[in-house]
Amino acid sequence: MDICFLYKRCGEMSQNIHFFKDQMSKIGVSPREFLDKEVDIDLDVVEVNLGEIETEISKISANNDKLQRFHNDLVEYKILLDKSHYYIAIAMSSNGETLSEKPKGVDADSFPGPIKPTGTSYVSSGLSNSDPHSKKTKSEASVSSGLTKPSGKTGVSSGLSIGVPNSKNPDCTKTGVSLGVRGKAAVSSRAKGKAIVSAKAVEVMSFKDVKFGPHGCELRFRLIHLWEARNVVTKMLIGLEMLLIDQEETVIQGFIPAGRIDTYLPHMKVGGIYKLNSFYGSNNKTLYRVAEPSVTITFSSSSVLSDLEDSSVCFPEDRFRFHGYEEFDAACDLRGDLYDYVGHIKLVNGQVLNDSLVLDDAEIASSRRVLLHVQTHDGPVMKLYLWDKAASDFSGKFKASGGAASVILVTTLNPKRFGDVLTLSSMTSSRVFLDSDVQATRDYLIWLNSNMDVADRVAAEIVTKTETVTIGEFFSYMKQEAAKVAWFECIATVGDVVHGSGWYYIGCGVCHTKATKGPTTLMCKKCGKSDIVGVAQ
């Protein structure tokens, strides 16, 4: 059996166990720290049990997310209904009139609601066109809930829109309550030659001011990127995740639940500028975050999305969060925020960049990955794995460049360790840019062209040099005074498995404490020695 394969299996199961421990700690359950020494461990049984537990936890997490979204929607509905009833009651009682009253000269079928004296506003609740014989003075302000446009008048209506001049809103001081047709803007007019909206304009909110809970304000933003969110076990579609940026260059994550994707997605495209009225501020996830804010913009059932046209405000096209080797190394295996990387390519699937380099589409399709060795300036060389869509995007762009691309930028990378080697792995949200795609790659390309001597200090062909040695030769190399720190990938064959024996660890030959791996030797923390003889315990 391949030792590397067993090592990888144990590493994956170890990560699952840490994840289960975190989940148990969140609910106040303390797991046992140690196993009984008499217990025999069967890797196959452990792997099956861990898989079953992970499936159950994933289902529980998915159900909890659904319940939380349903609860948020119900809370939003309640708030909207309470506000609507409050505003209607004020409008009906402000002049001692009821909805059944009508002024002279207006037919009962066309009467939209109570009319206040000149200089005040009224709230209309009718669904029909305005009567051509009804009269209003120029100083009157009207708010319409009609779904049709009055004859000979301008305006677009999107449902019930209620506005009161002196009303108070917990989120915005300048807003009405809108229950509009999703995906369209709400504007209504009843005066010839005038565009009359609510008594006060809707307040525009910036991303940095968004808090948890429902909001009736308006957001204006550019859509940077969107991708599907699926359950890792069942592959069921959970929703659509987005990356949004406002005029203040604040980037925030957005989310559209699966049931509302068909409503909004046909009207959206990457790079488009939009405005969103009525939304819900949800708590951002703690694992694998792609943006810094602690809240996520969630499209609710009352959200109204429309294009932002003729805007004088400039919205940035993108914003990156770059990390270098030291930052990625510090965040390795923590499953925290996902950061971006920019550097130059040393190897592509083990091949040095040259004119004869050709990518094998069949191999990429079957393995679903591309392995790159990359370097930032003269820093350490790292392995970068591009998976699935990121791999196919890289292949397409690399071929389009004629194999001449040398600079790469990949977003939202997950730092991991494989065999004690720091590697970067792409995620579903990752995007790939080469050479002249964005300003960041263009800037790095300028540096690379003027500092080729610095970038070439690490010879690319020796990064993954293949050399077959025996275990004896391997130990002889380690004992040399001139030996350098290096990483080896060892492939060995298991000669025998002794059944019935308990598991063991490599410990110090003196105090029997578990040994720690150093660069080239085994170390003992208790004895304080940096070179010990390991003994199976």
Image (spheres, rainbow, N blue to C red):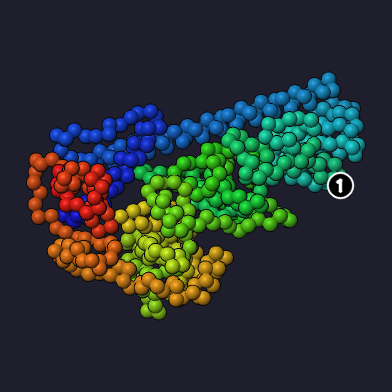
Residue 18 to residue 95: above or below: below
- Classify mark 1: residues with Cα within 10 Å, few (<14), some (14-19) or many (20+): few
Residue at image position (77%, 45%) is 155
Q: Is residue 31 above or below residue 499?
A: above
Give whichever of 353, 511 is nearer the camera. Answer: 511
Horizontally, residue 274 falls left or right of residue 328, namely right
Give the residue at the far bottom of this rendering: 355
* Residue 351: x %, y % from top left: 34, 72
Quadrant containing the N terminus in the rendered view: bottom left
Picture coordinates of residue 404 (x, y %)? 45, 75
Residue at 42% from the left image edge and 64% from the top image edge: 379
Q: Residue furthest front?
A: 528
Residue 302 in view here: no
Q: Residue at coordinates 72% horizontally, 41% vertically from top-left?
A: 203
Image quarter hosting the C terminus: top left
- Where residue 460 appears, as percent x and y from the top left, is 36, 72
| Residue type at the position of mark 1 | Gly
Residue at the (67%, 43%) spot, across then down: 205
Q: Nearer the viewer, residue 485 or 284?
A: 485
Report x, y in % for residue 94: 82, 23
| Callout 1 secondary element | loop
**Left or right: 45 in relation to 387:** left
Q: Is residue 502 left or right of residue 161?
A: left
Residue 451 visible in the displayed image: yes
Count of marks placed on residues: 1
Choose between 395 and 99: the one closer to the eye.
Answer: 395
Which residue, given by chain and number where applicable, does mark 1 sit on?
A: 193
Asked if residue 522 is positioned above or below residue 180 in the image, the reply reads below
Is 228 in front, or is 113? Answer: 228
Q: Is residue 356 above or below residue 498?
A: below
